[in-house]
Image (cartoon, rainbow, N blue to C red):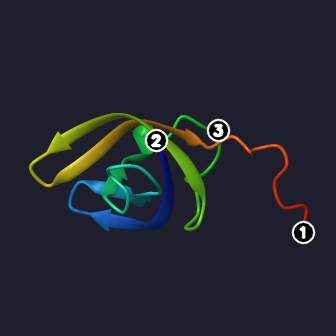
Amino acid sequence: MEAVVISIEEGKHGTYVVSKIKEGPLKEESVTFSPDAWKEEGPLPEPGSIVLLNNLVLKVAGMRARNVHYAPVSKGGDSG
């Protein structure tokens, strides 16, 4: 499920990323993920980045993604 990274926050359990789902029945729902869920090499994605959320889990405090990657770049996109 594609989402847009909104912010990187510090909480009582450490760093987490806040994202919003882009499309579908869960559009605009917030989903958070921890650095452990980030499966790419390098730093966490910056705000505005498009990511793929996998293995969503519903918790009392909201939805969490357990596996997150950068979304693939589609061919035929804006060449700017």
Label 2 amino acid?
Met
Q: Sort mark 1 into few (<14), some (14-19) or many (20+) by Cα contacts within 10 Å.
A: few
Relative horizontal placement of residue 70, taking residue 62 as reference (left or right)? right
Q: Nearer the viewer, mark 3 or mark 2?
A: 2
Label 3 amino acid?
Glu
Q: Residue at image x 42%, y 38%?
A: 37
Q: Quadrant of residue 80?
A: bottom right
Question: Could you tell which of marks 2 and 1 lies nearer the N-terminus?
Answer: 2
Mark number, residue 46: none
Q: Residue at image x 14%, y 55%?
A: 61
Relative horizontal placement of residue 52, taking residue 36 as reference (left or right)? right
Q: Nearer the viewer, mark 3 or mark 1?
A: 1
Q: Residue at image x 45%, y 53%?
A: 23
Label 1 amino acid?
Gly
Q: Quadrant of residue 47?
A: bottom right
Q: Position of residue 7 (x, y in %)?
A: 45, 68
Question: Could you tell which of marks 3 and 1 lies nearer the N-terminus?
Answer: 3
Secondary element type, mark 1: loop
Q: Sort mark 3 into few (<14), some (14-19) or many (20+) by Cα contacts within 10 Å.
A: few
Relative horizontal placement of residue 66, taking residue 57 as reference (left or right)? right
Q: Residue at image x 46%, y 41%?
A: 1
Identify the residue under disc 3: 41
Mark number, residue 80: 1
